[in-house]
Image (cartoon, grey):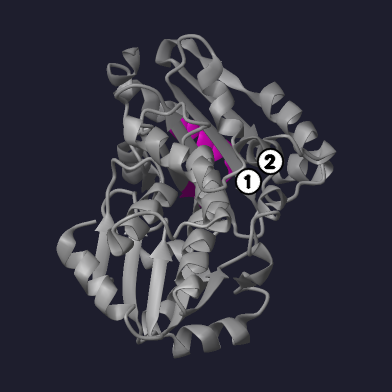
């Protein structure tokens, strides 16, 4: 975060404000961790701060300090809209285009508060007065840590509640610190968070070791459905709505399944296609290793984007048509997928 932006934010926070903090739709560990971590920090500074999420978030994140205070827009639209309308400052975290909040977009576009963006995805839009964007960061949670450090000139204001929230987001968005975005700085940040009260072993257990039977049944179904295309060093998984329903799908049950493809030898491109009949789309997650940019692939073909090695997208045709389109595209990328 540069000095000019730090000065602007310091000035804004020098007086009391009604502040709303927004994560993206279908929030993950980084989105919930960063928004809650920032909420605790702002409240400790005497600000009125509330997190409003577009929709609900996975059960494995519902232990996090302050999660019970999150307002779910789709469940309490009238209350959420009142907070957004009255807010003088609106933080948007872990996304950089208002379309990422789904049905909240219209409400945010009409809001008159000052927007501050903190995000690490590519191609940010220009809706915010202050844009703290860095695609090289491991996570938005690491950026919130930097944000606090820049405002306070040290990290002494990071409490155990903040530390637990930020650690969770860094851990989940780095694949437990194995992705290339994990730098020596990331490890130093994590070390400081542990020193400040992040219970790293307990967090890992609560996020990864509290699976439901439905989660494991869906994982089994997904792995059975995996298709390996050795000529393209690619593996993809499909999950139909029928399969999700049969296995009593709950929000968060498919989180991380796409990564299993990359555990295979000689696979550098992994994809999962998940049918969502309520929204009328196929939700797609892309992952890669090395120099193959799934961000560019998703943007070019599936109305998506994200990071070079992790991105999302969608399709408005059937699951069968979507996978057929995907497979047909691979020949054009064969040289890039050599590894």
Identify the residue shown where x is 53% and y is 31%: 176
Question: Observer-nearest residue: 72 or 228?
Answer: 72
- Percent across and percent down for residue 287 are 45, 31
Residue 307 quadrant: top left
Q: Magenta stretch: give its range.
A: 314-326
Task: Please report whichever mark, 1 or 2, sits nearer to the chain's N-terminal start.
Answer: 2
Question: Observer-nearest residue: 216 or 200?
Answer: 200
The residue labelled by disc 2 is 240
Q: Is residue 238 magenta?
A: no
Tell me how far mark 1 sits from mark 2, CA to CA: 5 Å
Question: Observer-nearest residue: 288 or 211?
Answer: 211
Tell me the SS state at disc 1. strand
Callout 1: 10 Å neighbours few (<14), some, many (20+)?
Answer: many
Identify the residue shown where x is 34% and y is 21%: 290
The residue labelled by disc 1 is 275
- Percent across and percent down for residue 142 are 40, 47
Q: Is residue 320 magenta?
A: yes
In the picture shown, does residue 257 fall above or below 317?
Answer: above
Identify the residue shown where x is 28% and y is 40%: 136
Question: Which SS does the magenta portion mostly show?
Answer: helix
Tell me the SS state at disc 2. loop
Identify the residue shown where x is 76% and y is 46%: 249
Query: Dots 1 and 2: beta carbons under 8 Å?
Result: yes
Res. 164 in view: yes
- Percent across and percent down for residue 208 are 68, 36
Q: How many marks?
A: 2
In the picture shown, does residue 89 fall above or below 153?
Answer: below
Q: Is residue 241 left or right of residue 167?
A: right
Q: Is residue 225 left or right of residue 147?
A: right
């Amino acid at each position: 975060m540069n000095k000019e932006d730090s000065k602007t934010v310091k000035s804004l926070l020098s007086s009391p404000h009604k502040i709303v903090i927004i994560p993206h739709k279908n929030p993950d560990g980084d989105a919930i961790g960063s928004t809650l971590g920032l909420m605790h920090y702002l409240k400790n500074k005497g600000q009125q701060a509330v997190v409003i999420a577009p929709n609900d978030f996975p059960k494995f994140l519902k232990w996090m300090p302050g999660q019970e205070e999150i307002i779910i827009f789709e469940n309490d639209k009238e209350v959420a809209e009142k907070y957004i309308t009255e807010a003088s400052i609106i933080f948007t975290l872990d996304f950089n285009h208002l379309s990422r909040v789904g049905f909240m977009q219209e409400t945010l576009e009409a809001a008159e508060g000052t927007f501050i963006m903190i995000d690490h995805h590519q191609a940010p839009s220009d809706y915010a007065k202050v844009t703290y964007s860095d695609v090289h960061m491991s996570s938005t949670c690491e950026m919130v840590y930097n944000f606090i450090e820049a405002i306070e000139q040290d990290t002494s204001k990071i409490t155990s509640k903040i530390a637990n929230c930020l650690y969770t987001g860094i851990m989940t968005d780095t694949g437990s610190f194995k992705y290339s975005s994990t730098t020596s700085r990331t490890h130093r940040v994590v070390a400081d968070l542990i020193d400040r009260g992040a219970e790293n072993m307990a967090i890992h257990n609560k996020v990864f070791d509290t699976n439901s039977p439905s989660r494991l049944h869906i994982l089994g179904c997904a792995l059975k459905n995996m298709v390996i295309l050795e000529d393209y060093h690619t593996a993809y998984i499909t999950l139909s709505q029928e399969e999700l329903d049969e296995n009593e799908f709950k929000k968060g049950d498919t989180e991380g399944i796409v990564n299993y493809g990359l555990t295979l030898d000689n696979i550098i491109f992994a994809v999962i296609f998940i049918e969502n009949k309520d929204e009328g789309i196929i939700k797609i997650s892309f992952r890669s290793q090395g120099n193959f940019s799934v961000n560019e692939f998703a943007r070019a073909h599936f109305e998506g984007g994200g990071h070079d090695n992790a991105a999302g997208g969608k399709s408005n045709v059937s699951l069968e048509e979507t996978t057929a389109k995907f497979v047909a595209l691979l020949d054009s990328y064969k040289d890039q997928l050599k590894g």
